[in-house]
């Protein structure tokens, strides 16, 4: 459990402002996110300030994430690819070795149509990252896309993952995984995790509640909502199983809670839910670390 930290996702534009608050509540890691671009943020200076804020707390920066479409290079995504490059170049300054985000995709084309561009763009980024000791992880959100069309991401389905990693079998390419996005597609996250755990570099703490009674009566194409994003501890996932599978696979990263999605615990209840989730996930990993007594359990003697 010393190797599996529980933390939170925070926006890069507010990182220095909110880190002290989260530290006061016991969060142990931070996934810093940027939407489509790192913008005017000087990552070298931000890394210095963030490391100073973390001080001797033991907390770490777990990942730098750029959410955008690096395959198009147009419109609001014009700086997304350059932002991936900047994040890779500055990851070590933050003390982390994971840079993550959406793969991007060719808009409104089936997933296979994006693979040549994906291979070109992330083949180069993977080499850049390898030179700097950085791993790249692909977030598994569909962003309302399907197999046939979408605007943001191809890495939301295990069949797509197979195509991606066949195209680029680099050891430093993996997944930024969470059960929620798979549950929205009615995929069993635990079975999936057992299959893909060795490729998971970072985990988002976000869950879902599936209303199977609604599905049985109305299906998934009607006007009735059948699934909701949830804060861990309030959804359907057994996070003890998630932690167990990750630890069995030697995972030494973090689970960073992704807030601002729960339809119940939101607004003035946002941080109450995140702190409750922090405490819940710490229990799921076995609580706080306690050293063993200095005796030999292998002696066979009572």
Image (cartoon, rainbow, N blue to C red):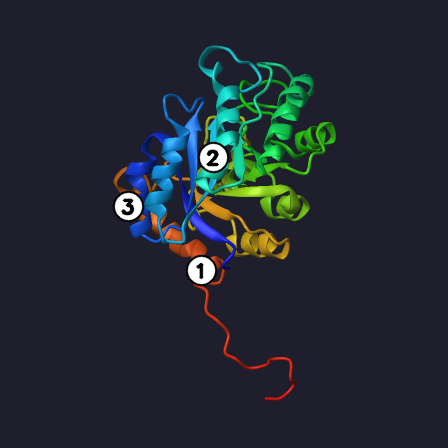
Instruction: Report the side of 260 relative to 135 (left or right).
Output: left
- Mark sitting on residue 64: 2
Residue 265 image position (x, y, % from top left): 33, 42
Q: Is residue 263 visible?
A: no
Say few, some or many: other residues with alpha carbon within 10 Å of mark 1 (under 14 / 14 to 19 / 20 or more): few
Looking at the image, which residue is at 30% across and 40% down? 18
Residue 215 located left or right of residue 225: right
Q: Which residue is pictured at 59% across the width and 32% down the height? A: 129
Cα distance, mark 3 to mark 2?
Answer: 20 Å
**Residue 138 in the image, given as x and y percentages of width and height:** 57, 33
In the rendered structure, which disc, 3 or 2, sits on the residue that comes first in sequence? 3
Q: Which residue is mark 3?
A: 21
Task: Confirm or deny contact between disc 3 and disc 2 (CB under 8 A).
Answer: no
Front residue of 151/292: it is: 292
Label 3 element class: helix
Quarter-of-image position of residue 196: top right
Which numbered tag is attached to residue 119? none
Residue topped by disc 1: 283
Residue closest to the far left: 268
Q: Is 239 left or right of 122, judged from the image as shown?
A: left
Crowdedness near tag 2: few (<14), some (14–19) or many (≥20) residues, C-alpha within 10 Å: many
x and y percentages locating residue 156 in the rendered image: 59, 31
Residue most extreme to the right: 166
Q: Quadrant of residue 123?
A: top right
245 is higher (above) or lower (below) than 256: below
Q: Residue furthest top?
A: 75
* Marks 2, 1: nearer the viewer: 2
Front in this rendered view, residue 85 or 173: 85
Q: Is residue 27 above or below residue 123?
A: below
Tag 2 secondary structure: strand
| Residue 75 visible to the viewer | yes
């Amino acid at each position: 459990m010393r190797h599996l930290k529980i933390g939170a996702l925070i926006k890069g534009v507010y990182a220095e402002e909110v880190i002290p608050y989260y530290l006061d509540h016991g969060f142990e890691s931070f996934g810093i996110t940027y939407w489509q671009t790192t913008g005017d943020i000087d990552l070298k200076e931000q890394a210095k300030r963030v490391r100073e804020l973390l001080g001797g707390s033991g907390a770490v920066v777990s990942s730098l994430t750029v959410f955008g479409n690096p395959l198009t290079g147009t419109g609001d995504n014009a700086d997304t690819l350059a932002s991936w490059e900047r994040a890779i170049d500055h990851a070590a300054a933050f003390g982390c070795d994971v840079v993550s985000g959406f793969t991007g995709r060719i808009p409104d084309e089936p997933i296979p149509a994006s693979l040549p561009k994906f291979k070109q763009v992330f083949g180069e980024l993977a080499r850049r990252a390898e030179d700097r000791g950085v791993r790249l992880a692909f977030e598994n959100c569909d962003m309302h896309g399907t197999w046939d069309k979408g605007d943001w991401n191809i890495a939301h389905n295990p069949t797509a993952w197979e195509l991606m990693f066949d195209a680029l079998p680099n050891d430093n390419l993996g997944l930024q995984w969470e059960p929620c996005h798979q549950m929205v597609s009615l995929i069993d996250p635990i079975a999936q995790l057992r299959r893909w755990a060795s490729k998971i570099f970072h985990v988002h703490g976000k869950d879902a509640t599936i209303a199977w009674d609604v599905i049985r009566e109305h299906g998934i194409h009607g006007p009735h909502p059948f699934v909701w994003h949830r804060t861990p501890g309030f959804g359907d996932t057994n996070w003890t199983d998630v932690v167990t599978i990750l630890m069995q696979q030697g995972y030494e990263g973090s689970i960073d809670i992704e807030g601002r999605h729960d339809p119940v615990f939101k607004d003035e209840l946002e941080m109450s839910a995140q702190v409750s989730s922090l405490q819940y996930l710490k229990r799921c990993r076995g609580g706080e670390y306690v050293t063993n007594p200095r005796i030999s359990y292998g002696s066979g003697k009572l």
